[in-house]
Amino acid sequence: MRIVVIGSGFGGLAAAIRLQAQGHDVTIVEKLDKPGGRAYVFTRDGFTFDGGPTIVTVPWMLDQLFAASGRETKDYVQLVKLDPFYNIRFEDGSVFHYNDDRAQLERQIREFDPADVEGYRRFSAHSQQVLEAGMALIDQPFHTIWPTLKVVPTLAKLRADRSVAGTAEHYLRDRRLRQVFSFHPLLVGGNPFRASAMYSLIHALEQRWGVWFAMGGTGALVRGLVRCFEDIGGTLRTNAEVTGILLAPGGGRATGVRLADGDVLAADAVVCNGDLAQAYRTLLPPSARPSMPDARLERMRHSMSLFVIYFGTTKQYPGVAHHEILLGPRYRELLEDIFERKVLADDFSLYLHRPTATDPSLAPPGHDCWYVLSPVPHLGSRTIDWERAAERYRDRIMGYLEERYLPGLSQHVVSERFIDPRYFERTLNSYLGAAFGPEPTLLQSAYMRPHSFSADIPNLYFCGAGPHPGAGIPGVVASGKIVADLIGRAPGTPRRERMHHSGPVAAAGAG
């Protein structure tokens, strides 16, 4: 079949590689001038800035993806394991060095509160149970309610009705440790106080498989996947924004896509890796999607957005780790400001990324490469005028970093740019400028999350952060597998599986 994939993020690349390996003729069309989607790379003044995700977990899922085309990960990208995974810093000056060394973790927990060592052991055991249940479902389609009903007893046993923060509070009593073991939903766009306890599997996932970095940056992983796709015959077109999904007369089936330059690409199936809510709203007429009207899309809870400053410095800061989580004076209250009240608070919590701690080649010699990220409300409330607020917010964040963590910063910045929710809305075509699609809540998970295919157009499929299982590199890579499996099983689909000899796929638990 001729298949067009809209968008070259990790979900689109994962679907495209698997579909091309099945024997289909696959073309990826990408709006921007290079691939990656949210993982776009900015290069400036000799610095290489990863625009989006920087945390790679579950490396065996990437091994499986390359192996689907008869290739091996090591031939396309070098992954290195980080230690620590993160430094988590608090306003009182205390620091938690987070990695997968159980003895070291428990030693630090004992220093914070001796009574929480046993609580952590119970929390860890619970998160491992959640991981076993969750990973079994990550690449399974939930297009009917029955798979969800089958796992209801498991969800009830694991207290999926509880939030991640509520789970941490159940097992731990130290305020700081509760934050250490509950912030993870923010990595996939969720509020720890609303995200289901099922998302506590992220802690177990990191403990089992580690946190990794692609040498050359996340962009090097994107380039490796693109090269793999092209090596097996796939086609990538950049500067090719899709303005409409074409339908057969009278509706029914998708017949291709129309590009902004007027070009038309015919297709037997279309896979959309673009923002799901925005794609439904702008690429299809309402009459073609009665099961997904605008009102339903607008009723969904959408993730927060981000304010990100990318900067390079002439000074190196060797005391700063690759990943730093800088937690501000408030936790729950700040999250309420971001997710519920949708106001720009006076304080913030930050994620500080220093990739030159691992790969100095991302900056000129003797320099450091950075980005600092602040979760902010999406554009739904329209209460923040970013035209006026952006520069002031930038100044507050950079001033805070200089005062507390990066002395002399203002004197050493030689390259800088920032993005705010407008970038996600205008450049990445994300509905309301939400950075992660629908918010990961219990009522927007599994069957209740948007599905991997259109209920109205049988040969239109969705992957990426929007459908099940959701955001994060493991989730969107799994979404690509779901789509490829669905197309491979579709009635009347010609399937010519490419036969390759390749090495063994890394087993679960391999580093």
Image (cartoon, helix red, strand yellow):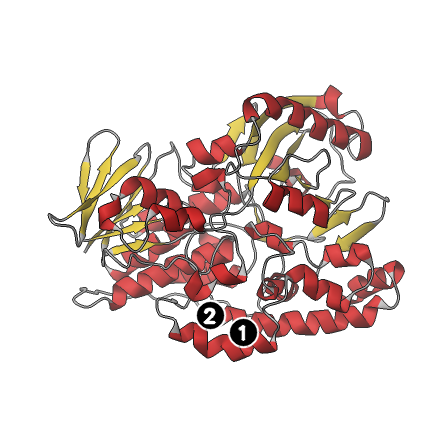
Residue 293 as seen in the image, left or right of residue 173: left
Pinpoint residue 270: horizontal percent, then vertical percent: 25, 51
Residue 220 as seen in the image, left or right of residue 413: left
- Observer-nearest of 426 and 71: 426
Near mark 2 (Cα within 10 A), the count class, few <14, some 14-19 or many ≥20, is some
Quarter of the image where the C terminus is located: bottom right
Pinpoint residue 58: horizontal percent, then vertical percent: 54, 61
Pinpoint residue 276: horizontal percent, then vertical percent: 38, 48
Q: The residue under label 1 is which amino acid type?
A: Ala
Quadrant in which residue 453 is drawn: bottom left
Task: Give the answer, above or below, for where 301 lies relative to 403.
Answer: below
Quarter of the image where the N terminus is located: bottom left
Residue visible at 39% across and 57% down in the picture: 450
Q: Is residue 193 visible?
A: yes
Task: Give the answer, above or below, for where 86 lies relative to 123.
Answer: above
Label 2: element kind: loop
Residue visible at 61% across and 31% down in the picture: 309
Kindly indicate whether the residue at mark 1 contacts the one at mark 2 (C-beta within 8 angstroms).
Answer: yes
Q: Is residue 101 visible?
A: no
Q: Which mark is residue 137?
A: 2
Q: Which mark is residue 375?
A: none
Quadrant in which residue 361 is drawn: top right
Per the image, the residue denoted by label 1 is: 133
Residue visible at 49% across and 43% down in the picture: 220
- Observer-nearest of 434 and 106: 434
Task: Give the answer, above or below, for where 304 lies relative to 66.
Answer: above
Q: The residue under label 2 is which amino acid type?
A: Leu
Label 1: element kind: helix
